[in-house]
Structure formats: structure tokens, C-alpha cells
Amino acid sequence: MGSKSTADVMAKHNYVDNAAKMGAYLMGKLKGHKAIKDLRGRGLMVGIETVADAAEIRKKLLFDEHIFTEFSGGVNTIRLIPPLCITEKEIDRFVEAFDSVTR
């Protein structure tokens, strides 16, 4: 039995291409959102600078919507680092949850 390297698995499943495609999809869905002051990132590593306190938004995402996010930089920045295999359906779920907790 041969073992596969991480690079082999990533190539087989097109994870790099998926990260670029889904990152663009995510950025497009979030662009212009009323609760977002700045949106930055590349691929699926996305930083969302919020208008309101990000800690409260992160708390609501976690406890109300069961979505885990990271923080980065200042008080108002949420960091998303989803798996490379994420789908449009899962991104849509995040965007709906983000809409819900930032109303």
C-alpha cells in the first residue's frame, strides 16, 4: 500500500481550484453588505471588518447559528478559514447566518 501525499490528495480533488472559485463566490456574496466596513483576502482566507463589534457577531454566529469563526487584528475583524472542499451551499448558509445575526 502506498501513501498519498497531501499534494496528491489536493490535486486529485482540485482543492486549489475550488479554493479560488469558492473564495471569489464568497467575496461576491459579501461585497456591499451593510454590516461590512472592509472585505479582504485571497482564496478562502477572508477577513471581514465589521461596522459593529465583531465579538458580538462571532458570538451570535457560534451560539445561534453554530458557525465557528476566528478573529484577527482589531476588534472589528472576523477571519474565515473554511475547508478547501467548501461548497456554494455551505457558503450560502454562512451568508444567510451572517445576515441573520447582523440585522
Image (cartoon, rainbow, N blue to C red):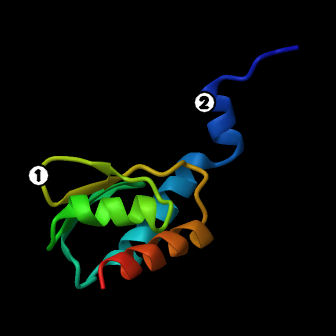
The residue positioned 38% from the left and 53% from the top of the image is 69
Residue 11: x %, y % from top left: 65, 40
The residue positioned 61% from the left and 64% from the top of the image is 87
List the single residue furthest toward the top: 1
Q: Which residue is mark 1?
A: 74
Please give the count of numbered marks on the rendered protein: 2
Q: Split into 4 quadrants, where in the image is the C terminus?
A: bottom left
Asked if labels 1 and 2 touch by Cβ distance under 8 angstroms, the answer is: no
**Secondary structure under the numbered disc 2 in the rendered image:** helix
* Tag 2: amino acid: Ala
Q: Which residue is mark 2?
A: 7
Whole-Å distance between the Cαs marked 2 and 1?
A: 34 Å
Q: Split into 4 quadrants, where in the image is the N terminus?
A: top right
Q: Is residue 79 left or right of residue 9?
A: left
**Secondary structure under the numbered disc 1 in the rendered image:** loop
Q: Which mark is residue 6?
A: none
Q: Nearer the viewer, mark 2 or mark 1?
A: 1
Q: Is residue 43 left or right of residue 12?
A: left
Residue 18: x %, y % from top left: 57, 56
Q: Nearer the viewer, residue 9 or 102?
A: 102
Q: Is residue 100 above or below residue 38?
A: below
List the single residue furthest toward the right: 1
The residue positioned 60% from the left and 30% from the top of the image is 7
List the single residue furthest toward the left: 74
* Tag 1: amino acid: Gly
Q: Earlier in the sequence, mark 2 or mark 1?
A: 2
The residue positioned 55% from the left and 54% from the top of the image is 17
